[in-house]
Image (tube, rainbow, N blue to C red):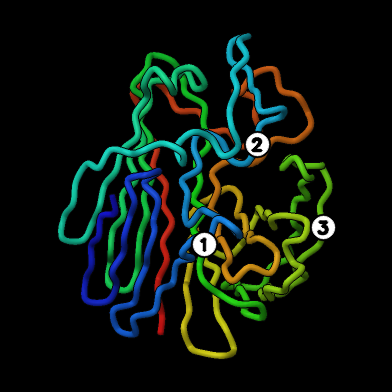
Amino acid sequence: MIHYIENDYLKIGVKDDGAELTSVISKETGIEYLWQGNPDVWYGQSPVLFPIIGRVLDDVYYLNGKEYTMPKHGLFRKRKAQFVEQTSNSLTFKESADEETLKIFPFDFEVFVIFELIDKSLKVTHKIINNGDDTMYFSIGGHPGFNCKIGDYLLFDTNETLDTIEIDTECLRTGKTIPVLDENNKIVITKDIFNNDALIFNGMKSKTITLASDDHNRKVIFDYSDCSYLGIWAKPGAPYVCIEPWWGVNDSHERKDDISKKDAIISLAANNTYECYWKAEISE
């Protein structure tokens, strides 16, 4: 089922499956800003990544000496979320621990995903609750894909000197980096830019990145807040780009003997809550 809310400027839709955003339409122009999905290209639209980003090495991780299997990007995106609440300007969904999740992620968690319309912006908040007695280790991330075309570009809000973190065909960090920006703020979307998978940045000075074009005045101004890593990705040559705020990162080929030692992992004490958000503003 798809749930809809709208205000004077925007109308959005969110699916029960994965609490996945499926539509962002400008009411002024009727333009759809979100990639509409195509299984021949990329079936996704805006999956929620939890409790890992990318892959763990060999699809396994360890906790207190026990081995667990975890699929790429975690468990949230392939499950049906519980619809919790609709207000005049928000939709709330929840995913909770159950017998199935405990087999691969042995924590008593709740993850709320809240979609909120604020004027011409969509704010998406992730609220993670540890209901268990032990510290919980996890990552969380967004993965929204926005319609665009080859030749459109992304602009950081200030000049940056950034390298992308190289990943291999197994979606694992190689330990190498590749220069992308040298005191510049513009990344042009070419048909080849994602031939080696995503661009992955950290240490950005900017707080926003804007999707823009020389062919029109429409923009998506994306606030990735305090994410530790920012992914930018699409299938090579495809007419969309994903802007991905990550509170976490892919594994490298270095084997860690416990998930608590995973790079950029979040640790959440028992009976505590963690919140993060991203926001997309439509400008026309």
Is the C-beta separation of discs 2 and 3 under 8 Å?
A: no
Viewer-closest of 227 and 107:
107
- For numbered disc 3, what is the local secondary structure? strand
Residue where numbered disc 3 is placed: 178
For residue 218, side relative to residue 85 (left or right): right
What residue appears at the point 38 percent right and 35 percent down from the top-left corner?
Answer: 128
Q: Is residue 153 above or below residue 268?
A: below
Q: Which mark is residue 145?
A: 1
Q: Quadrant of the C terminus?
A: bottom left
For residue 283, side relative to residue 13 (left or right): right
Residue 237 found in image quarter: bottom right
Q: Which mark is residue 55?
A: 2
Label 3 to label 1: alpha-carbon separation? 24 Å
First in sequence: mark 3 vs mark 1: 1
How crowded is the residue under tag 1: few (<14 C-alpha within 10 Å), some, or many (20+)? many
Which residue of the protein is positioned furthest toward the top in this rendering?
65
Q: Position of residue 202 (x, y in %)?
A: 65, 53
Q: Nearer the viewer, mark 3 or mark 1?
A: 1
The amino acid on which the numbered mark 3 sits, given as a three-letter code, is Ile
What residue appears at the point 18 percent right and 51 percent down from the top-left corner?
Answer: 86
Residue 254 found in image quarter: top right
The amino acid on which the numbered mark 1 sits, given as a three-letter code, is Gly
Q: Position of residue 139 (x, y in %)?
A: 53, 37
Q: Position of residue 25 (x, y in %)?
A: 35, 72
Q: Is residue 167 above or below residue 32?
A: above
Q: Position of residue 51 (x, y in %)?
A: 51, 33
The amino acid on which the numbered mark 2 sits, given as a three-letter code, is Arg
